[in-house]
Image: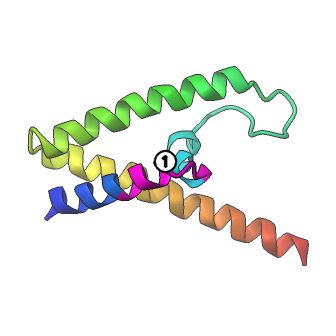
Amino acid sequence: MIRGFVFLIAVFWLFLAAGGSVVALVPLGCFYPGPMPGELGYNPTGAHAWMAGMAVLFVWLLIASLHQKSRFAGIAFISLTVLPMLWFGARFADAMRGLH
């Protein structure tokens, strides 16, 4: 069941990335420890390096989950994909609430 859910998330994520959607980058950059874009001290090179490293981690978790049938890797992949989306949605909703 976990492998099926991982496969569905991966396919959905790849379709988003192939379509050029910025939403596909949210799980990669969500846990960046530095300042966010627009804040003082933001370093785009550091942010892109962080996202490249996270992409390597996501691919490793995906391969470990689907090919090696690792339950831990599947749960980690699902968690690292879904939780940032929820966090981003909460931040976006908070920003929209601040506009009214």
Q: Residue furthest front?
A: 19
Residue 65 image position (x, y, % from top left)? 18, 44
Q: Residue furthest bottom?
A: 100
Which residue position holds label 1?
17
Please identify the quadrant where the N terminus is shown.
Answer: bottom left
Q: Residue at x 89, y 72 (%)?
A: 99
Q: Residues within 10 Å of mark 1 (few under 14, many from 20)?
A: some
Residue 96 image position (x, y, % from top left)? 80, 71
Which portion, as a residue range, is magenta?
Answer: 12-22
Q: For the residue labelled by badge 1, is the local secondary structure a helix, a strand or a loop?
A: helix
Q: Main secondary structure of the magenta part?
A: helix
Task: Indicate whether 53 appears above or below 72.
Answer: above
Is 9 placed left or right of 72 in the picture?
A: right
Nearest the viewer among 97 and 44 is 44
Amino acid on which the number 1 mark rests in the picture:
Ala
Q: Residue furthest right?
A: 100
Is 36 placed left or right of 13 in the picture?
A: right
Q: Residue at x 46, y 26 (%)?
A: 53
Q: Residue at x 79, y 65 (%)?
A: 95
Indicate whether residue 17 is drawn in magenta.
Answer: yes
Please identify the quadrant where the C terminus is shown.
Answer: bottom right
Q: Residue at x 85, y 40 (%)?
A: 38
Is 69 placed left or right of 83 in the picture?
A: left
Indicate whether residue 30 is drawn in magenta.
Answer: no
